[in-house]
Image: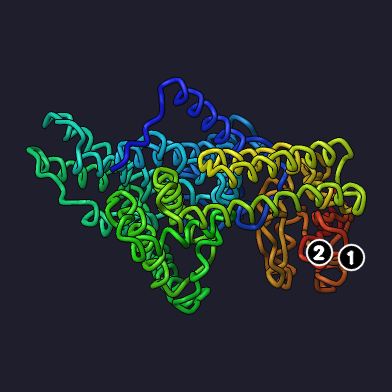
Amino acid sequence: MTDLRIEPEAGRIRYFWLVAVCVIAFFVNAGVLQSDLMESRNLVTAQEMTRYGNWLTPTMNGTLRLEKPPLPTWVAGAIELLRPDSLPAQRAAAGVMGALWTLFLYLTVRTVTRRDHAAVVSCLIFLTCYSVVLMGRTATWDIYCHAWMQGAVWLLFSLYYPRHAISRRRRIWEFTACGVMMGLSFLSKGPVAFFALLLPFLIACPFYGRPRRSPGNGRGLTAMIAAMVAVSAWWYVYIYLAHPEMASAVLHKETGAWVNHNVRAWWYYWRYSAETGVWALITTAALLAPVLSRKVRRDRALVFAVVWMAASVILLSLMPEKKMRYLLPAMAPCAMSAGLLLCWIESHRKECRWGRVLFRVNAWLIAAATAGLAGGALYMWLGMGKADAWVAVTGCVLMLCVAAWMGVCAVKMRVTGFVDAVAALFIVAECLLMSQVTHFFVNPEFHSLKEVRGDVRLEGVELYSTDKETIRMELVMAAGRRILPADFSDAKAMRRLMPCAVVTHGPVGEALPAELLQQADTLRVGVYDDNRHPRSDRHYNQALISYVTLLRAKGEE
């Protein structure tokens, strides 16, 4: 196998470059994107942990939320205690997990290939995959389980394919650490990463070679399983003992969702490589290269990565429930496959004609797209008025420079330089263009329900919604407290709850029964619009309109 190890001086520079790309990918301008429904659900659960102290039995708007394992919610709750109501801080936690995933992927690739350069290239590709960057900038829980499982994968590979002799005691400790990471993965999102990341890895291992039998493996495996069960199972046991009926209902609901919810055809993921963005062509080529080229098949690390990628996509395709974001765990083996293929092309560029053609076609396509993006930056300013002049001009100039750099790399077959150019393109987008996203979400009527937090008229007053209307979690998150459903048709029961406030999607006179209104004094607190899009936009959602009305029983002061 050709040695692609780089010089120590160059290595240090590339490590700094990799760290810089990682920091920018996950943390710069992470707070500019608006919060979506999934993110709101997670943060509402964290808010209620801190407000009501239900750390072991999470709730979402007063209802037990046992569908999601609690580890990421505990992290979000801790952040809520330190930085209340800070969306950037919550997203930074996901960014930390994205950075940890990148670190473990680097260690995995370096252990598999014995090449630092290949590990850096693979991680740069990973950090420029669209779905990885998006999930690392969103306060959701998917990235937690995969980051921990990547660490377990790295330790497993280093234990069964050791580069150096490892003492029995150290092996047991590493097996135990592996089990802890598996347990943390399970405590983050159940068995998802076991099925989508670990099992494909185990399927790919025989294509790398026969694992080495070493003393201590038996005890190590026992320690790994014990640690995994101890870390992951205790909360589920507690929930089953504390809420057996609810736990059984949730288990039935979740298993039913796997086969009845968002059911897609088995070929739904045929375009999986598109999730890698600019690396789609290289990722697809990596899948075919070992089949079509005998020389590629001799690189067992590349074959291992390709089988790992293919097994991950195939196993995910076997599940009836499918969403494109569920392909996130496949991005690690995809990035590794693309990175190792590019490194192979770089080391065989003189004798491999198809590799040169593939690389140049991909490089020229991305260079042309980058030049088009430069023109798009100017159009955002001059044609749409959605960008600041200095951002548009600076972004245009920088992207034209990156496009020219890509062209030079294509002509001179500088594979590593091209990967760096793509990383530079993402840096320009994340540092400059991302800051202009807010210009696309301007609602002149925006008036958030968040304002009720400081309204003295609602101090000590509970918020309710009618049981006929569904309250969006975005509104619960904005209010900063529960908005519980109530049966307003029972006037006597509602009178006992007064004074209270009701949140409706229309005027209170249209939402509440006349009998109740005759027994209550009403005071409109305000009308709120939490839409970031204007009314003329097709994404405008009437469910984000809220009328808040204070109800007091007649005759009360």
* Type of amino acid under label 1: Ser
* Residue located at (43% from left, 67% from top): 254
Q: Residue at x 51, y 61 (%)?
A: 273
In front here: 519 or 52? 52
| Mark 1 vs mark 2, CA separation in Å | 7 Å
Image quadrant in which you'd find residue 231: top left
Q: Tell me which corner region of the image, top left, top right, bottom left or bottom right, holds residue 545.
A: bottom right
Mark sitting on residue 68: none
All told, the count of numbered labels is 2
Locate residue 269, reporting x and y percent: 49, 69
Residue 432 shown left or right of residue 110 in the figure? right
Q: Residues within 10 Å of mark 2 (few under 14, many from 20)?
A: some
At 11% from the left and 32% from the top, the residue drawn is 168
- Is residue 215 left or right of 442 when viewed as pictured? left
Residue marked by disc 2: 540
Element assignment for label 2: loop
Quarter residue 451 falls in: top right
Q: Which residue position holds label 1?
A: 536
Q: Nearer the viewer, residue 486 or 400?
A: 400
- State the colouring used for the structure image: rainbow
Q: Is residue 185 above or below residue 15?
A: below
Horizontal and vertical percent position of residue 343: 42, 44
Q: Dot 1: what SS?
A: loop
Could you classify mark 1 by the number of other residues whose Cα lies within 10 Å: few (under 14), some (14-19), or many (20 or more)?
few
Q: Which quarter of the figure is the N terminus placed in?
A: top left
CB atoms at circles 1 and 2 under 8 Å apart?
yes
Question: Which amino acid type is shown beneath numbered disc 2?
Answer: Tyr
List the single residue furthest toward the front. 351
Is 430 situated above or below 485? Answer: above
